[in-house]
Amino acid sequence: MGASVRPSFSEGLGGEQGWPEALRGRGPQAVSGILTALRRAGLWSPRRQLLLATWQALSRALGTMDAESLLLSLELASGSGQGLSPDRRASLLTSLPLVKRDYRYDRVLFWGRILGLVADYYIAQGLSEDQLAPRKTLYSLNCMEWSLLPPATEEMMAQTSVVKGRFMGDPSHEYEHTELQKINEGGKVFEEEVVVQIKEETRLVSIIDQIDKAVAIIPRGALFKTPFGPIHVNRTFEGLSLSEAKKLSSYFHFREPVQLKNKTLLEKADLDPSLDFMDSLEHDIPKGSWSIQMERGNALVVLRSLLWPGLTFFHAPRTKNCGYIYVGTALQGEELKAVNTGLGNHLGLSQGISDSTFSNWLEMGSRPLHFPGSEHT
Protein backbone atom coordinates (compact mmCIF):
# COMPACT_ATOMS: atom_id res chain seq x y z
CA MET A 1 0.00 0.00 0.00
CA GLY A 2 1.16 3.57 -0.60
CA ALA A 3 2.86 5.44 2.18
CA SER A 4 0.76 8.58 1.72
CA VAL A 5 -2.49 8.26 3.66
CA ARG A 6 -5.23 10.85 3.11
CA PRO A 7 -8.04 11.57 5.59
CA SER A 8 -10.77 8.95 5.67
CA PHE A 9 -14.44 9.23 6.52
CA SER A 10 -13.74 7.80 9.96
CA GLU A 11 -10.79 10.16 10.53
CA GLY A 12 -13.12 13.05 9.69
CA LEU A 13 -15.15 12.01 12.75
CA GLY A 14 -12.27 12.03 15.16
CA GLY A 15 -9.75 9.34 14.31
CA GLU A 16 -9.40 5.83 12.85
CA GLN A 17 -11.68 4.41 15.56
CA GLY A 18 -14.19 7.25 15.22
CA TRP A 19 -16.52 5.62 12.71
CA PRO A 20 -17.40 2.42 14.58
CA GLU A 21 -17.41 4.02 18.03
CA ALA A 22 -19.18 7.31 17.28
CA LEU A 23 -21.71 6.30 14.63
CA ARG A 24 -22.57 2.66 15.22
CA GLY A 25 -26.33 2.23 15.27
CA ARG A 26 -27.03 5.96 15.68
CA GLY A 27 -29.56 8.00 13.75
CA PRO A 28 -29.08 11.41 12.16
CA GLN A 29 -29.99 13.31 15.36
CA ALA A 30 -27.31 11.49 17.36
CA VAL A 31 -24.72 12.09 14.64
CA SER A 32 -25.72 15.75 14.53
CA GLY A 33 -25.12 15.96 18.29
CA ILE A 34 -21.67 14.39 17.93
CA LEU A 35 -20.65 16.85 15.25
CA THR A 36 -22.14 19.79 17.19
CA ALA A 37 -19.85 18.82 20.08
CA LEU A 38 -16.90 18.87 17.68
CA ARG A 39 -17.90 22.37 16.57
CA ARG A 40 -18.03 23.62 20.15
CA ALA A 41 -14.64 22.08 20.82
CA GLY A 42 -13.15 24.02 17.90
CA LEU A 43 -12.76 20.90 15.77
CA TRP A 44 -15.35 21.84 13.14
CA SER A 45 -14.48 22.01 9.43
CA PRO A 46 -16.31 22.36 6.10
CA ARG A 47 -15.53 18.69 5.43
CA ARG A 48 -17.36 17.63 8.59
CA GLN A 49 -20.30 19.79 7.52
CA LEU A 50 -20.39 17.94 4.19
CA LEU A 51 -20.20 14.57 5.98
CA LEU A 52 -23.11 15.53 8.23
CA ALA A 53 -25.27 16.65 5.29
CA THR A 54 -24.47 13.44 3.42
CA TRP A 55 -25.23 11.28 6.46
CA GLN A 56 -28.55 12.99 7.18
CA ALA A 57 -29.73 12.80 3.57
CA LEU A 58 -28.78 9.13 3.27
CA SER A 59 -30.40 8.23 6.58
CA ARG A 60 -33.68 9.89 5.64
CA ALA A 61 -33.78 8.28 2.21
CA LEU A 62 -32.37 4.80 2.80
CA GLY A 63 -32.65 4.22 6.53
CA THR A 64 -29.81 4.55 9.04
CA MET A 65 -28.49 1.00 8.65
CA ASP A 66 -28.40 1.12 4.83
CA ALA A 67 -26.81 4.59 4.92
CA GLU A 68 -23.99 3.28 7.15
CA SER A 69 -23.53 0.31 4.87
CA LEU A 70 -23.35 2.39 1.70
CA LEU A 71 -20.80 4.84 3.07
CA LEU A 72 -18.57 2.17 4.61
CA SER A 73 -18.84 -0.02 1.51
CA LEU A 74 -17.61 2.86 -0.64
CA GLU A 75 -14.73 3.43 1.78
CA LEU A 76 -13.68 -0.22 1.58
CA ALA A 77 -13.79 -0.04 -2.22
CA SER A 78 -11.73 3.14 -2.07
CA GLY A 79 -9.17 1.28 0.05
CA SER A 80 -8.65 -1.17 -2.82
CA GLY A 81 -8.09 1.68 -5.28
CA GLN A 82 -11.56 1.49 -6.81
CA GLY A 83 -13.42 4.23 -4.98
CA LEU A 84 -15.99 6.55 -6.50
CA SER A 85 -15.42 10.18 -7.39
CA PRO A 86 -17.36 12.84 -5.45
CA ASP A 87 -19.64 13.30 -8.47
CA ARG A 88 -20.50 9.60 -8.56
CA ARG A 89 -21.16 9.51 -4.83
CA ALA A 90 -23.44 12.54 -5.12
CA SER A 91 -25.28 10.89 -8.00
CA LEU A 92 -25.85 7.72 -5.95
CA LEU A 93 -27.08 9.83 -3.05
CA THR A 94 -29.63 11.46 -5.35
CA SER A 95 -30.73 8.54 -7.50
CA LEU A 96 -31.00 5.53 -5.16
CA PRO A 97 -33.81 7.03 -3.04
CA LEU A 98 -35.68 7.75 -6.29
CA VAL A 99 -35.21 4.15 -7.40
CA LYS A 100 -36.60 2.95 -4.06
CA ARG A 101 -39.60 5.25 -4.36
CA ASP A 102 -40.40 4.70 -8.04
CA TYR A 103 -40.13 0.90 -7.93
CA ARG A 104 -41.66 0.68 -4.42
CA TYR A 105 -38.88 -1.46 -3.01
CA ASP A 106 -38.61 -2.19 0.69
CA ARG A 107 -34.84 -1.60 0.51
CA VAL A 108 -32.36 -0.61 -2.17
CA LEU A 109 -28.74 -1.75 -1.88
CA PHE A 110 -25.77 -0.54 -3.90
CA TRP A 111 -24.43 -3.87 -5.14
CA GLY A 112 -21.20 -2.62 -6.69
CA ARG A 113 -19.34 -1.85 -9.88
CA ILE A 114 -18.23 -4.05 -12.77
CA LEU A 115 -15.21 -2.59 -14.52
CA GLY A 116 -15.44 -2.49 -18.33
CA LEU A 117 -12.92 -1.60 -21.00
CA VAL A 118 -14.93 1.37 -22.30
CA ALA A 119 -17.22 2.15 -19.34
CA ASP A 120 -18.19 0.67 -15.97
CA TYR A 121 -21.50 -0.80 -14.87
CA TYR A 122 -22.88 0.44 -11.55
CA ILE A 123 -25.27 -2.09 -10.05
CA ALA A 124 -28.09 -1.66 -7.52
CA GLN A 125 -30.62 -4.17 -6.23
CA GLY A 126 -34.15 -3.71 -4.92
CA LEU A 127 -35.47 -5.99 -2.18
CA SER A 128 -39.06 -6.68 -1.26
CA GLU A 129 -40.34 -7.21 2.27
CA ASP A 130 -39.48 -10.92 1.93
CA GLN A 131 -35.70 -10.63 1.94
CA LEU A 132 -35.07 -13.91 0.09
CA ALA A 133 -37.59 -13.19 -2.66
CA PRO A 134 -35.92 -12.73 -6.08
CA ARG A 135 -34.07 -9.43 -6.05
CA LYS A 136 -34.60 -6.89 -8.81
CA THR A 137 -31.33 -5.78 -10.38
CA LEU A 138 -30.68 -2.46 -12.07
CA TYR A 139 -27.62 -1.06 -13.80
CA SER A 140 -26.39 2.41 -14.68
CA LEU A 141 -23.47 3.87 -16.57
CA ASN A 142 -23.58 7.22 -14.77
CA CYS A 143 -25.16 6.48 -11.33
CA MET A 144 -28.18 8.58 -12.30
CA GLU A 145 -30.18 6.76 -14.99
CA TRP A 146 -31.04 3.19 -14.02
CA SER A 147 -32.27 0.36 -16.25
CA LEU A 148 -34.01 -2.74 -14.90
CA LEU A 149 -32.44 -6.05 -15.89
CA PRO A 150 -34.52 -9.18 -16.56
CA PRO A 151 -34.20 -12.13 -14.15
CA ALA A 152 -31.51 -14.70 -14.94
CA THR A 153 -32.61 -17.94 -16.62
CA GLU A 154 -30.89 -21.29 -17.21
CA GLU A 155 -30.89 -20.52 -20.93
CA MET A 156 -29.05 -17.24 -20.31
CA MET A 157 -26.47 -18.97 -18.11
CA ALA A 158 -25.77 -21.63 -20.75
CA GLN A 159 -25.64 -19.10 -23.56
CA THR A 160 -23.19 -16.74 -21.84
CA SER A 161 -20.93 -19.43 -20.36
CA VAL A 162 -18.90 -19.48 -23.58
CA VAL A 163 -18.00 -15.78 -23.33
CA LYS A 164 -14.65 -15.08 -21.66
CA GLY A 165 -12.64 -12.00 -20.85
CA ARG A 166 -13.49 -8.47 -19.77
CA PHE A 167 -16.75 -6.63 -20.21
CA MET A 168 -16.77 -3.84 -22.78
CA GLY A 169 -19.07 -1.50 -20.85
CA ASP A 170 -21.61 -1.22 -23.67
CA PRO A 171 -24.95 -3.00 -23.04
CA SER A 172 -25.69 -3.20 -26.76
CA HIS A 173 -22.34 -4.81 -27.60
CA GLU A 174 -22.69 -8.29 -29.12
CA TYR A 175 -20.21 -11.12 -28.75
CA GLU A 176 -19.90 -13.63 -31.56
CA HIS A 177 -19.55 -17.32 -30.81
CA THR A 178 -19.23 -20.07 -33.39
CA GLU A 179 -20.77 -23.41 -32.50
CA LEU A 180 -21.67 -26.63 -34.28
CA GLN A 181 -25.36 -27.36 -34.66
CA LYS A 182 -26.91 -30.54 -35.98
CA ILE A 183 -29.02 -30.00 -39.09
CA ASN A 184 -31.60 -32.57 -40.24
CA GLU A 185 -32.49 -32.40 -43.92
CA GLY A 186 -34.19 -35.17 -45.85
CA GLY A 187 -33.47 -37.75 -43.16
CA LYS A 188 -29.76 -36.89 -43.21
CA VAL A 189 -28.10 -35.38 -40.14
CA PHE A 190 -24.98 -33.26 -40.52
CA GLU A 191 -23.20 -30.59 -38.50
CA GLU A 192 -22.97 -26.98 -39.55
CA GLU A 193 -21.09 -24.03 -38.08
CA VAL A 194 -23.45 -21.33 -36.85
CA VAL A 195 -22.47 -17.89 -35.54
CA VAL A 196 -24.42 -17.02 -32.37
CA GLN A 197 -24.80 -13.41 -31.21
CA ILE A 198 -24.75 -12.84 -27.44
CA LYS A 199 -25.65 -9.42 -26.04
CA GLU A 200 -23.48 -8.00 -23.27
CA GLU A 201 -26.60 -7.09 -21.28
CA THR A 202 -27.50 -10.80 -21.18
CA ARG A 203 -24.01 -11.62 -19.96
CA LEU A 204 -24.32 -8.93 -17.28
CA VAL A 205 -27.49 -10.58 -15.94
CA SER A 206 -25.76 -13.97 -15.77
CA ILE A 207 -22.59 -12.73 -14.06
CA ILE A 208 -24.45 -10.80 -11.37
CA ASP A 209 -26.58 -13.88 -10.66
CA GLN A 210 -23.46 -16.08 -10.42
CA ILE A 211 -21.74 -13.69 -8.01
CA ASP A 212 -24.89 -13.36 -5.90
CA LYS A 213 -25.32 -17.11 -5.55
CA ALA A 214 -21.64 -17.73 -4.83
CA VAL A 215 -20.54 -14.91 -2.53
CA ALA A 216 -23.38 -12.62 -1.37
CA ILE A 217 -23.17 -12.77 2.45
CA ILE A 218 -25.21 -11.92 5.53
CA PRO A 219 -24.33 -12.53 9.21
CA ARG A 220 -26.26 -15.10 11.21
CA GLY A 221 -29.20 -13.48 12.94
CA ALA A 222 -29.56 -10.48 10.61
CA LEU A 223 -32.64 -12.14 9.07
CA PHE A 224 -35.29 -14.32 10.63
CA LYS A 225 -37.83 -16.72 9.18
CA THR A 226 -41.42 -16.49 10.34
CA PRO A 227 -43.51 -19.63 10.94
CA PHE A 228 -45.47 -18.69 7.82
CA GLY A 229 -42.39 -18.68 5.57
CA PRO A 230 -41.43 -15.08 4.63
CA ILE A 231 -37.93 -13.88 5.55
CA HIS A 232 -37.71 -10.49 7.29
CA VAL A 233 -35.00 -8.18 8.59
CA ASN A 234 -34.42 -9.01 12.26
CA ARG A 235 -35.05 -5.72 14.07
CA THR A 236 -33.66 -7.18 17.31
CA PHE A 237 -30.31 -8.14 15.75
CA GLU A 238 -27.53 -6.35 17.63
CA GLY A 239 -24.60 -7.82 15.73
CA LEU A 240 -22.27 -10.75 16.25
CA SER A 241 -20.06 -10.97 19.30
CA LEU A 242 -16.34 -10.50 18.73
CA SER A 243 -15.64 -14.23 19.03
CA GLU A 244 -18.51 -15.16 16.68
CA ALA A 245 -17.43 -12.55 14.15
CA LYS A 246 -14.12 -14.37 13.64
CA LYS A 247 -15.80 -17.62 12.52
CA LEU A 248 -16.92 -18.46 8.98
CA SER A 249 -19.79 -20.44 10.52
CA SER A 250 -21.32 -17.11 11.62
CA TYR A 251 -21.95 -16.04 8.04
CA PHE A 252 -24.54 -17.29 5.58
CA HIS A 253 -25.04 -17.13 1.83
CA PHE A 254 -27.67 -14.48 1.11
CA ARG A 255 -29.83 -16.74 -1.09
CA GLU A 256 -32.10 -19.74 -0.94
CA PRO A 257 -30.29 -22.70 0.71
CA VAL A 258 -28.76 -25.48 -1.37
CA GLN A 259 -26.66 -27.57 1.04
CA LEU A 260 -29.09 -27.26 3.96
CA LYS A 261 -31.68 -29.35 2.12
CA ASN A 262 -29.23 -32.26 2.00
CA LYS A 263 -28.55 -32.34 5.76
CA THR A 264 -29.90 -35.22 7.81
CA LEU A 265 -32.37 -34.73 10.65
CA LEU A 266 -29.53 -35.41 13.10
CA GLU A 267 -27.42 -32.65 11.55
CA LYS A 268 -30.36 -30.25 11.74
CA ALA A 269 -31.11 -31.07 15.39
CA ASP A 270 -28.97 -28.23 16.79
CA LEU A 271 -30.13 -25.63 14.26
CA ASP A 272 -32.59 -22.87 15.05
CA PRO A 273 -35.14 -22.96 12.18
CA SER A 274 -35.88 -19.24 12.57
CA LEU A 275 -32.20 -18.28 12.14
CA ASP A 276 -30.32 -21.21 10.53
CA PHE A 277 -32.26 -21.45 7.28
CA MET A 278 -29.40 -20.59 4.88
CA ASP A 279 -26.10 -22.23 3.93
CA SER A 280 -23.08 -21.45 6.10
CA LEU A 281 -19.79 -20.29 4.57
CA GLU A 282 -17.80 -22.84 6.58
CA HIS A 283 -18.76 -25.63 4.18
CA ASP A 284 -17.89 -23.76 0.97
CA ILE A 285 -15.92 -25.56 -1.71
CA PRO A 286 -13.06 -25.06 -2.39
CA LYS A 287 -11.83 -24.71 1.17
CA GLY A 288 -9.85 -21.55 1.77
CA SER A 289 -11.86 -19.49 -0.70
CA TRP A 290 -12.52 -16.84 1.96
CA SER A 291 -10.13 -14.44 3.62
CA ILE A 292 -11.26 -13.13 7.03
CA GLN A 293 -9.50 -10.40 9.03
CA MET A 294 -10.19 -8.19 12.02
CA GLU A 295 -9.30 -4.57 11.34
CA ARG A 296 -9.30 -1.19 13.08
CA GLY A 297 -8.41 -2.73 16.42
CA ASN A 298 -11.04 -5.49 16.21
CA ALA A 299 -13.75 -2.90 15.48
CA LEU A 300 -14.41 -4.29 12.01
CA VAL A 301 -14.36 -7.76 10.47
CA VAL A 302 -13.73 -7.93 6.73
CA LEU A 303 -14.29 -10.99 4.53
CA ARG A 304 -12.96 -11.15 0.98
CA SER A 305 -13.68 -13.76 -1.62
CA LEU A 306 -10.78 -15.41 -3.43
CA LEU A 307 -13.25 -17.18 -5.71
CA TRP A 308 -14.62 -13.87 -6.99
CA PRO A 309 -11.83 -11.34 -6.25
CA GLY A 310 -13.44 -7.94 -5.71
CA LEU A 311 -16.20 -9.05 -3.32
CA THR A 312 -15.75 -7.46 0.12
CA PHE A 313 -18.07 -7.97 3.10
CA PHE A 314 -17.84 -6.05 6.37
CA HIS A 315 -19.44 -6.22 9.80
CA ALA A 316 -18.85 -4.15 12.91
CA PRO A 317 -19.22 -6.63 15.80
CA ARG A 318 -21.89 -5.85 18.39
CA THR A 319 -23.67 -3.53 15.93
CA LYS A 320 -26.23 -3.97 13.16
CA ASN A 321 -23.80 -2.48 10.65
CA CYS A 322 -22.94 -4.89 7.84
CA GLY A 323 -22.93 -5.10 4.07
CA TYR A 324 -21.02 -6.17 1.00
CA ILE A 325 -19.85 -4.61 -2.23
CA TYR A 326 -18.38 -6.04 -5.42
CA VAL A 327 -15.86 -3.99 -7.39
CA GLY A 328 -13.98 -5.91 -10.05
CA THR A 329 -13.70 -7.18 -13.60
CA ALA A 330 -16.27 -9.98 -13.14
CA LEU A 331 -13.56 -12.58 -13.68
CA GLN A 332 -13.39 -15.58 -11.36
CA GLY A 333 -10.14 -16.47 -9.64
CA GLU A 334 -9.13 -19.02 -12.29
CA GLU A 335 -9.97 -16.67 -15.17
CA LEU A 336 -8.04 -13.89 -13.47
CA LYS A 337 -5.11 -16.25 -12.99
CA ALA A 338 -5.13 -17.07 -16.71
CA VAL A 339 -5.12 -13.37 -17.59
CA ASN A 340 -2.27 -12.67 -15.14
CA THR A 341 -0.30 -15.68 -16.42
CA GLY A 342 -0.61 -14.26 -19.90
CA LEU A 343 0.61 -10.93 -18.53
CA GLY A 344 3.58 -12.67 -16.90
CA ASN A 345 4.52 -14.27 -20.22
CA HIS A 346 4.19 -10.88 -21.91
CA LEU A 347 6.56 -9.40 -19.33
CA GLY A 348 9.12 -12.06 -20.17
CA LEU A 349 8.59 -14.37 -17.19
CA SER A 350 9.34 -17.82 -18.61
CA GLN A 351 6.89 -19.59 -16.28
CA GLY A 352 4.26 -16.85 -16.36
CA ILE A 353 3.16 -15.89 -12.85
CA SER A 354 3.50 -18.61 -10.21
CA ASP A 355 0.63 -19.88 -8.09
CA SER A 356 2.25 -18.46 -4.95
CA THR A 357 2.73 -15.03 -6.54
CA PHE A 358 -0.86 -15.06 -7.79
CA SER A 359 -2.14 -16.00 -4.33
CA ASN A 360 -0.12 -13.17 -2.82
CA TRP A 361 -1.72 -10.76 -5.28
CA LEU A 362 -5.19 -11.91 -4.22
CA GLU A 363 -4.24 -11.69 -0.56
CA MET A 364 -3.07 -8.08 -0.96
CA GLY A 365 -6.66 -7.10 -0.29
CA SER A 366 -6.49 -8.68 3.18
CA ARG A 367 -3.88 -6.26 4.50
CA PRO A 368 -5.02 -3.53 6.94
CA LEU A 369 -6.89 -0.91 4.97
CA HIS A 370 -5.81 2.65 4.36
CA PHE A 371 -8.40 4.97 2.92
CA PRO A 372 -7.22 7.27 0.14
CA GLY A 373 -9.32 10.22 -0.94
CA SER A 374 -12.19 9.82 -3.35
CA GLU A 375 -10.38 11.14 -6.39
CA HIS A 376 -10.59 7.69 -8.05
CA THR A 377 -13.16 7.44 -10.82
Image (spheres, helix red, strand yellow):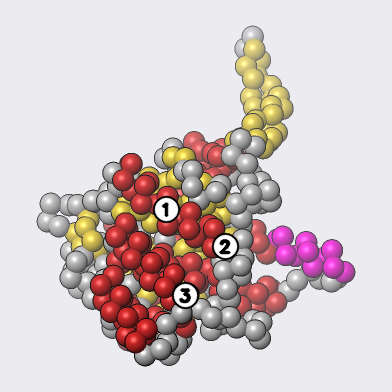
Question: Residue 57: horizontal and vertical position, in percent?
Answer: 35, 61
Numbered disc 3: secondary structure: helix
Seen in the picture, residue 252 relative to 19 is either above or below; the reply is above
Q: What is the crowding at mark 2: few (fewer than 14 residues within 10 Å), some, or many (at least 20)?
A: some
**Residue placed under numbered mark 2 in the picture:** 85
- The magenta region covers 338-348
Instruction: Please report whichever mark, 1 or 2, sits nearer to the chain's N-terminal start.
Output: 2
Q: Quadrant of residue 202?
A: top right
What's the mark number on residue 94? Answer: 1
Seen in the picture, residue 270 relative to 181 is either above or below; the reply is below
Q: Looking at the figure, which quarter contains the N terminus?
A: bottom right
Between 295 and 377, the one lying in front of the other is: 377
Q: Residue at x 31, y 45 (%)?
A: 101
**Residue placed under numbered mark 3 in the picture:** 46
Is residue 78 found left or right of 279 in the rendered image?
right
Q: What is the crowding at mark 1: few (fewer than 14 residues within 10 Å), some, or many (at least 20)?
A: some
